[in-house]
Amino acid sequence: MPGFAYAPGSLLTVEHLSIADVAGIITTTARLERMEAAERARLLVRRTIALLFYESSTRTRTSFELAAKSLGATTTLVSDKSSSIEKGESLKDTGLTLRALGAEAIVLRHGASGAPFLLARTTGLPVLNAGDGMHQHPSQALLDLRTILNRLKLTGHVNANILHGITIVIAGDILHSRVARSNAMLLPRLGAKVILCGPEAFLPEDALGLGAGIEIERDFDRALQQADVAMMLRIQKERLADGGSNGNGLDLAEYCARYQLSGERLAAFAPTALVLHPGPMIRGLEIADEVADGPQSAIEEQVGHGLAVRAALLVRALGVAA
Ligand code: CP
């Protein structure tokens, strides 16, 4: 890790992960899944993990919590809505308080990009970034990777070529998406071609600077024709300049006509592609019901892989061999 030495086991950005780290996390995930429940529940017994959430979450919060409990850990949830954060307590002081109460690792979701770095620096604890602003969502990229590997039956050891020949289209509101950013920075390092697709307002040209192996294609149908995997993203109304009150002046009907993954579009341009969505989905906007619930969709499987991968990340954070 470059610069400041964050506590081993921290996961702040996919940029800090070597290919060997990614391979290790995927291997540990599989090992934990195969383990008897009783054996697994001994791994983190008498260990304490804090879940610190400043933004809403269903999948990430619940899967980290259930994963921690399945490993025998004690968890505590602190939300900005029902804690002294409401009274103005800072992130630093909240972290130091959790550490004083015995937390050995903190899972943090925060609206400000970079907040997990601050928390890791001020507490010295392993911090797992559960999504920071428009910056990173590294555990989501890892669970997306595992879903792709499993569905495409890429069973070999993870290496820099494991996704060679695979094209992944990420479509929708790329600009505001930490999921897009983490995936676009991780998947090409494993050999994938990543095509970003969306209108200029949601996909500025400088997205190409995320790294090698990334292309931009504005025409969704043309992008889909190349796709082995189509990852759909919702419009992040909460991050729009106008607070989402009128969708930033977006013509939703036009957006849907150009970028909605409908059953008709999928059948015409990507009849065998795997469909992913990190959730939450806005059905009828970026994705149609028949696609979300259809045979090409692995959206529910993604949630399951989230539980599995996050168990491996917690074990790694607390330095336990599994
Ligand atoms: N994918 C994701 O981060 O979902 P949640 O906001 O529900 O955690």
Image (cartoon, helix red, strand yellow):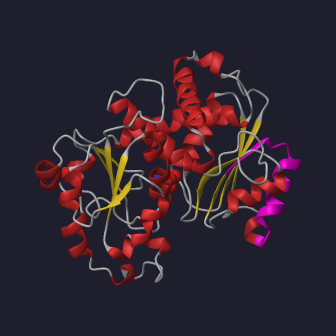
Q: Residue drawn 75% across and 43% down?
A: 105
Location of residue 22 with respect to 322 vertically, above or below = below
- Read off the magenta span: 87-107
Q: Residue drawn 53% across and 65% down?
A: 134
Task: Report whether 86 appears left or right of 226.
Answer: right
Percent across and percent down for residue 320 are: 73, 27
Q: 244 or 161, which is in the foreground? A: 161
Examine the rendering and report whether any part of residue 316 can be seen: yes
Location of residue 126 with respect to 305 vertically, above or below = below
Q: Residue drawn 60% across and 35% down?
A: 21
Q: 137 or 283, which is in the foreground? A: 137
Percent across and percent down for residue 179 are: 47, 55
Location of residue 161 with respect to 124 vertically, above or below = above
Residue extending farthest to the right is 100
Percent across and percent down for residue 160 are: 47, 36
Q: Which quadrant would the C terminus be assigned to in this image?
A: top right
Q: Residue drawn 27% across and 75% down?
A: 252
Task: Report whether 107 appears left or right of 97.
Answer: left
Residue 60 in the magenta stretch? The answer is: no
Q: 302 or 10, which is in the foreground? A: 10
Residue 105 in the magenta stretch? The answer is: yes
Task: Report whether 179 appears left or right of 123.
Answer: left
